[in-house]
Image (cartoon, rainbow, N blue to C red):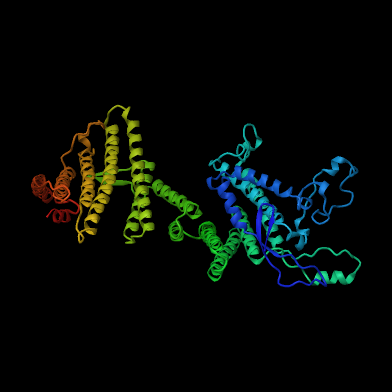
Amino acid sequence: AKITTGNKICTMASPTNSNSNTQPPPLPTMRIHLHSELSTAHSSHGVLYEDYPQYSAYCTRRLSRLRHGKPVKKELLHCRMYKSALSTKVEEPGKEGAAVGSNKARHAYRAIDMNNLPSEVLAGHVSYFWEPLYCAERCWAASMAIKAESNGAGSGGGGGGALGGGNDPKRDWSPGKIRAHSIKRLRKAAKFATMLETLTMSTKKAPSADNDNEEAEENATTNDASPPVDEHTQMEARAYASWMRGNLALEQNQWQTACNEYQMALTLCESLASDIHGRKSAEDEDGKKNAMQQLELFDFFTNRAMNVIAPLLRYCHYELQEKGMSPTEKISFLQSSSSVTDTPNDPLQSKLHSLKAQTLQTQATTGSSMSQIVFRENNIAVETKELRMALLKIQDLKGEWEENTKGGNNNNNNASSSDAKFMALLSGYDDAISLTNQELKQLATLKSGPAVNAKKFQLVNILGFGKYQKLKLVMSRNEDLANGIIRRNKKKGMTLKHFEEVAHLYDALLQDGRAVVSISGGGAPEDFDGNTSSSAAVEDEFLLEANANILRLRSLRCYYLAQMHASPLVHKYQEALALLDQAESLAQEASEEIGACDQMEGGDDLLENLE
């Protein structure tokens, strides 16, 4: 059976039997989808965009509508006009004062204790459960808004921010006071969530009309009433309350309590998902609509367990194990813990990044590594701390990217992770190049001299080193992509589209190869004139290798252009023959130049590729 309560339709389990002779039939048990309601509210009122003030204002409006519902306002409104013997807190005698009968006292505030409501009253309307739920949500949203604004993230609309605007005194609060205020709101949210859990499991019976009958009192204590909601709703309420209590313990740095609460919430969400999945496969008579709803709930609880609760639980486990671990052990632990889910809301990811930054800063300060680089046969000292940190970060990112690419997994997740690490590595090179350019600009206003020229020589070579390593990385990746296209389509045969893709990649490679030739640096320090803008080429092994590589790339580009012209769709055979002759001539010249470079990296493989 289904009954309509307010704006919600709650499923009711019909009673199996009734005793009309002794007592009226019990009310059917409600099923309330708490998490589904919260998911809809979050997605519709700004939580996805971290606009917590907007969501808090929505919760306030929703609570007002719930409390003013005609069936429940006597128990839920904080007004003495609707004073109820069931929900009003017991007050001490003489506390109300002398003006009890006045109109002001009639509309004064009254404290409500929802735990006094009997189970059969709670089962009469769903608003008794929505009210503590949205009270908890409002307090949680206020806490998150305070935390976001204190961290400088700000928030969207919704009333000028959690810390007030203009001349609000909250703007002058210290960070400790702001954190205490946030924890206070979160403590209140945990209190309302615990109240919701208590209400769903309430077995309190209505008070008997005959208070003098001792037998009635004994029966009331021995025979409890049935809970107002079914077991599924009770599990949802317990999961929500455990998650909220875990959030409070996390903010208070009570890691063991947070672990226990998050573990309980995770277990309950997994149980709910498995229960829904089992019922969905067992009950096929309810129709496609019910099956689709069950499938949606299964995905929701699985996603909440894996992407919301599990990262918080791993973070608490890390905090418990952090004491007594070295920085290297901490990083390895975080990497192994964060490799399962690389979601943006994983707290371990931010902890891992901050710990790596601290380690890099320590290494850069002590000068234990990356204090010297070798570029174009010159040993260049890296004197500034910022540049050493940038180079150490590049070294770390490069190791992560190489480890990811050597894994050999070709799935979409691994490919997207490899692309993200590659872009992070390029960004690291850009940071190092930008820092070097800033230092060169500071030296540009100084007069030339031996010390100034020596410093400029160092920075010019560091700049050239950063540009060369970045171009080398991009060229290696593009050539691997071209070889991959050729290798994948070698058996089936290359089409015109494949030849176009390969030729386009070699166009980019040729452009990068010419950029390598124009990189400044090299030579002897005493021959440097102090002019950083001049790009006079220095004849050394580096320049010979770069020119030989350009010849090789030109030869391969001509070869694949010839294949394009010789394809059946183009059939320009004369142009193809001319391009093949040019490719052969360039290949012979490139082979001679590569053979003359004794120290060229991968020279033998390049010669085999040309053959």
Q: Is residue 549 above or below residue 116?
A: above
Side of 101 relative to 349 (left or right): right
Q: Residue at x 57, y 53 (%)?
A: 39
Q: Is residue 333 above or below residue 534?
A: below
Residue 415 lies, in percent from the top left, at 35, 56
The residue nearer to you, when weighing 474 against 481, is 481
Q: Residue at x 33, y 35 (%)?
A: 437
Side of 606 relative to 157 (left or right): left
Residue 535 lies, in percent from the top left, at 22, 34
Locate the N terminus and report the quarter of the image it occupies.
bottom right
Q: Is residue 439 above or below residue 325?
A: above
Residue 146 shows in the view: no
Residue 113 shows in the view: yes
The residue nearer to you, when weighing 8 against 498, is 8
The residue nearer to you, when weighing 162 against 378, is 162
Residue 373 lies, in percent from the top left, at 28, 46
Q: How many marks?
A: 0
Side of 506 relative to 123 (left or right): left
Determine the image quadrant of residue 4: bottom right
Determine the image quadrant of residue 338: bottom left
Side of 601 relative to 370 (left or right): left
Residue 165 lies, in percent from the top left, at 62, 34
Locate the C terminus and report the quarter of the image it occupies.
bottom left
